[in-house]
Amino acid sequence: MAADVHNGEAGKAIFSEQVRAGGRTYFFDVRESKNRRRYLVITETRKTGTGRQRASILVFPDDVEAFGQALRKAEGRLQNA
């Protein structure tokens, strides 16, 4: 994916971070659409009995701040449990 980070083509990942957690892997990708708008894709992949399962959510620039606030609140509840 490193080639996508540097070529700047529309629809390609321009940033990618990977987090491994047990049998799950999370990818945080900033992508750029054909009209040059950026958005965040968070993808989880996990091992299943028959292979891998994958789920993604998209977070658009207008929603990033609220998404981050909700994530930090949830993180606080996990840490204080």
Image (spheres, grey):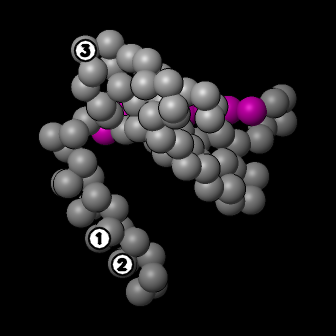
In the image, is 79 to the left or to the right of 76? right
Mark 1 or mark 3: which comes first in sequence? 3
Q: Do the residues labelled 2 and 1 touch (CB within 8 Å)?
A: yes
Which residue carries the number 2 mark? 76
Query: Which residue appears at 28% of the width and 58% of the height?
Result: 68
On the image, which quarter does residue 77 sit in?
bottom left
Give amino acid for label 2: Gly
Q: How many labels does the image show?
A: 3
Who is closer to the viewer here, 53 or 62? 62
Query: Which residue appears at 45% of the width and 82% of the height?
Result: 79
Q: Where is residue 57 in the image (x, y as percent from the top left)?
A: 41, 35
Q: In this view, does 47 lie above or below 7?
A: below
- State which quarter of the image contains the N terminus: top right
Give amino acid for label 3: Asn
Q: In this view, does 24 lie above or below 7?
A: below
Query: Which residue appears at 25% of the width and 14% of the height?
Result: 35
**Span shown in magenta:** 52-59
Q: Visible in this render: residue 71?
A: yes
- State which quarter of the image contains the C terminus: bottom left
Give amino acid for label 1: Lys
Query: Which residue appears at 55% of the width and 49% of the height?
Result: 17
Who is closer to the viewer here, 11 or 41? 11
Q: Which residue lies furthest to the left in this view?
A: 62
Image depth: mark 3 or mark 2 in front: 3
Q: Does the magenta stretch include residue 58?
A: yes
Q: Is mark 1 on a helix, strand or loop?
A: helix
Which residue carries the number 1 mark? 73
Q: Does the magenta stretch include residue 77?
A: no
Q: Is mark 2 on a helix, strand or loop?
A: helix
Q: What element carries label 3?
A: loop
Q: Position of residue 8 (x, y in %)?
A: 43, 25
Q: Visible in this render: residue 41?
A: no
